[in-house]
Image (cartoon, helix red, strand yellow):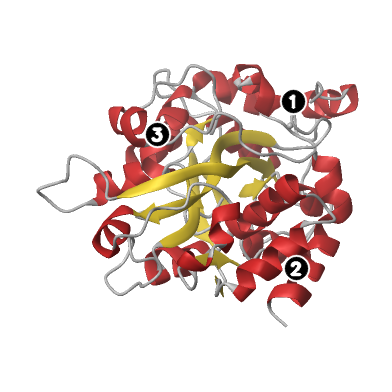
Amino acid sequence: MARLTFVVGATVSALVLAACAGGSGGGSAASTAADVGSPPAASFAPVTVTLLAHDSFAVSQKVLDAFTARTGITVKVVTGGDAGEVVNKAVLTAGHPEGDVLFGVDNTLLSRAVDARLFAPYRAQALGEVRPELAGLVPGYAVTPIDYGDVCVNLDDRWFAAHGVAEPQTLADLTDPKYKGLLVVENPATSSPGLAFLLATIARSGDSGYLDYWKQLRANGVQVVNGWTEAYEGAFSGGSQGGTKPIVVSYASSPPAEIVYAKDPKPTRPSTSVMTDGCFRQVEFAGVLRGTEHEQAARALVDWMLTEAFQADVPLSMFVFPARAGTPLPEVFQKFAATPKQPLTLPPADIAKNRQRWVDDWTSAVLR
């Protein structure tokens, strides 16, 4: 999920469970998962594991250091743009990966990764601690849910107040001439939130109606950029000094990030808000890359990403919700993160079958 840089239903198949329990090189990853959070006890000879991730991946250094102290594994994080870009690059080297673990492939992109056989068969030992609706999202895939969030339209409240314009409330409102030229979105071909927003419009308008909706947005002056950073920190008036667009596709958790990263004296409330109509639920996964030379250490890293220590670090590091059930949320999240009551979704099988056609048709209708 490329997001703030100031930042699926059945059980796991027996085949995957067997592969997870008996993969090459023994089962030290399971004991490592239990050891994380206990007194330091290295389970591996010193080794460096490379974690490929999107630009918005973040974790506290103390959490990284604790993992290294307990396992002997040093984590080298290599970021490579938006989640869509990271997956595209990984597909080109499938079986001969440039890293050991990939984080950030989400439910909108997962079928592409699976079709390319990016991942070795492994899911974290603590999968049973994951929220059931996330753990069961994509049965049989060799990945583990790590976090989730909702892609939503965000609004610059100050801009609307200053200009005396009522804020939009629904996806349909965005086609109203009063909002002409005010919306910036991400390209679904290169951006995970952009793809999620496209899927939201399909979930709302249907396969036969979403292009008509987008043609209306185009006629209303929608701006399309490549990724989240360019949209939120560049074009959005609420996220930068020079942005001019008061409506942007971002996340339900963007307002808490505004508070956390504000300079002192910090505001008591964010100046941006979330339009909760038309949000799309996005789940991020991590997996061991097929062909890694450090498979057991890579498994341990995936296990670690579901430990209480890592999961508690997720909200204020990456501004998404932790996948592990019962993980406490910081106060700023509880106060200001929007929680859509009925986020839009599409069956993963439908996304897998139609994603490329949807993106190609969108490109023809909006960009050409």
* Residue farthest toward the left in the current orientation of the protein: 265
The residue under label 2 is: 362
Residue, disc 3: 313
Q: Is residue 352 above or below residue 136?
A: below
Of discs 1 and 3, which sits in the foreground? 1
Spatial separation of the CA atoms under disc 1 and disc 2: 30 Å
Residue 8 position (above or below residue 56): above
Q: Which badge, 1 or 2, comes first in the chain's sequence?
A: 1
Q: Secondary structure at mark 1?
A: loop
| Residue drawn where x is 29% and y is 33% of the image | 332
Q: Position of residue 5 (x, y in %)?
A: 40, 56
Pointer 2 or 3: first along the chain: 3
Regarding residue 59, the answer to whether it shows in the image is no
Mark closer to the chain start, 1 or 3 = 1
Which three-letter amino acid code belongs to the residue tagged 1? Gly
Residue lying farthest to the bottom in this orientation: 368
- Three-letter amino acid code at the position of disc 3: Asp
Q: In the image, what residue occupies the spot 43% across and 45% down? A: 274
Residue displayed at 58% across by 62% down:
175
Q: Which residue is mark 1?
A: 136
Residue 335 seen in render: yes
SS label for mark 2: helix
